[in-house]
Amino acid sequence: MRIDVWSDVVCPWCYIGKRRLEEALAKSGEQAEVVWHSFQLDPSATNDDERDLATRLGEKFGGGREFGLQANERVTGIAAEVGLEFHLDVAKAANTVDAHRVLHLARELAEAGEAPADTQGRLKERFLRGYFTEGLPMGDHATLTRLAVEVGLPEVQVAEVLAGSEYADDVAADQAQALAYGANGVPFFVIDQKYGVSGAQPVEVFAEALRRAAADRQPVTLITTPGGSDADACGPDGCPI
């Protein structure tokens, strides 16, 4: 089973949705390849914005800083229900394009056999924890490099990617694909290129999507003549007559 996920590393519902998906997978016993795709919630965000998250939320959605504080408190409580520790009071503003480019590097190295298969997933988790729990600046190159090296990426290659624009087109392509699917927000999950799940749905919703996808992959049950003999048919070597 393959699960494609569009999300951002500064999206609280993306982290919560990740945990709920993982719980559904654990309960189902399904083995899945999870591929992480880029989606920037705010491509215009800057790394030098010194306003705290509550202030930024209040100005963006209205209601002032008090609204932002209440929103942070609510999502922090929901995160705790799935075992996540949020410290949004220290969350730093960031443009996440470079984090996404490094995630593409991790995926490419894994696909080439130059890194373990789960490297991209582990890096995604590290970036999310860095932002939500540790208050790390996820637009800072030194921080991104340190976290990537922690999960096993070669420091030289990470530095080369961050020094240029490699994978920027892949980030843009991911964003375009999400919009083509009709995803105007994240997280957005596509299971076996057939079943879509929008948002951080309850575990039961993920479980049902996994069940349907697994059912679709069940082998066809053959109906044969009594005794199980095959009827006449054509095969790779032709048609015996």
Image (spheres, rainbow, N blue to C red):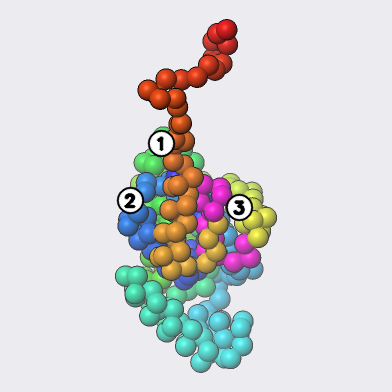
As rendered, which of 16 and 197 lies closer to the eye? Answer: 197
Q: Tag 1 or tag 2, which sits nearer the N-term? A: 2
Q: Which mark is residue 174?
A: 3
Q: Residues within 10 Å of mark 3 (few under 14, many from 20)?
A: some
State which quadrant residue 89 falls in: bottom left
Q: Is residue 81 left or right of residue 103?
A: left
- Look at the image and give the residue range highlighted in magenta: 183-195
Q: Tag 3 or tag 2, which sits nearer the N-term? A: 2
In what element is the residue under mark 1? loop
Q: Are marks 2 and 1 in contact (CB under 8 Å)?
A: no
As rendered, which of 128 and 213 lies closer to the eye? Answer: 213
Q: Which residue, given by chain and number where applicable, does mark 2 sit on? A: 29
Counting from the top left corner in percent of width and height, residue 28 is at 35, 54
Most frequent secondary structure within the magenta stretch: loop
In what element is the residue under mark 3? helix
Counting from the top left corner in percent of width and height, residue 220 is at 47, 36
Counting from the top left corner in percent of width and height, residue 84 is at 34, 70
- The mark tally for this picture is 3
